[in-house]
Image: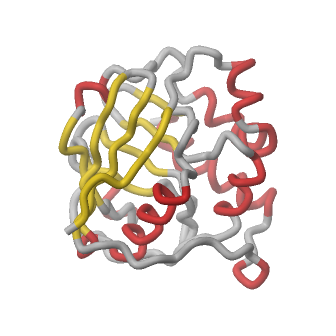
Amino acid sequence: MKSRSLFILGACGLMAVFGLNLLAQEKVSSKKAPAVFQAKFETTAGDFVIEVHREWAPIGADRFYNLVESGMYDECKFFRVIPDFMVQFGISGDPKIAAKWRNAPLKDEPVMKSNKRGFVTYAKAGLNSRTSQIFINYKTNASLDSQGFAPFGQVVEGMDVVDKLNSEYGGAPSDDQFMIQEKGNEFLEKKYPRLDSIKRATIIDKK
């Protein structure tokens, strides 16, 4: 239960520190995503593919499309890997890029799909707080549905790769989210040197 609480509270602490301001956010890319598209993630553990259905969560799908196209996920670390729960990532290794997206939170939207194994969802810290951090469910986490965690896609290839991402640090790195945001990969590589990471994320199919 402690790990699942940190999933929400860690991000909440960050919001208090950084004071997200919708009126003073830096402009971020905001293209409309295709109805269905796939994103390939090349990682240090192998490759996996996420298929996104815009109708499941249009706001989240659009943001994810722009995040991938902009290269935001390139070199990101899988900083929270909790077996039998989920793996979380999406803080840029470059603090300047991380700040850009962190200051552009999204409005919440209805939960149309359940948080089943392989489904992909944004991490959030309360109302209208989604930014760039996402997680992949390792099992069905239906309890997250009633908390407003709305899946926007699912892993359609390479779930075995997702399963084997290094989990030796568990949820510990998420306790250091302030430092991750401030120092990026420089901090993670010193304190958590064996984390797996994304080499490159690209859009590979649009419908």
Residue 32 in the image, given as x and y percentages of width and height: 40, 78
At 74% from the left edge and 75% from the top edge, which residue is drawn? 25
At 69% from the left edge and 22% from the top edge, which residue is drawn? 189
At 30% from the left edge and 52% from the top edge, which residue is drawn? 204
Classify 32 as above or below 6: below
Residue 74 or residue 25, whichever sits in front = 74
Residue 165 or residue 138, whichever sits in front = 165
Classify 129 as above or below 119: below
At 45% from the left edge and 20% from the top edge, which residue is drawn? 167
Q: Let me know if residue 64 appears in the view.
A: yes
Residue 180 in the image, given as x and y percentages of width and height: 72, 38
Picture colour scheme:
secondary structure
The answer to which image quadrant residue 26 occupies is: bottom right
Taking the image as shown, residue 197 lies to the left or right of residue 138, namely right
Residue 156 in the image, given as x and y percentages of width and height: 18, 44
- Viewport quadrant of the N terminus: top left
Q: Let me know if residue 115 appears in the view.
A: no
- Viewport quadrant of the C terminus: bottom left
Classify 62 as above or below 23: above
The answer to which image quadrant residue 38 occupies is: bottom left
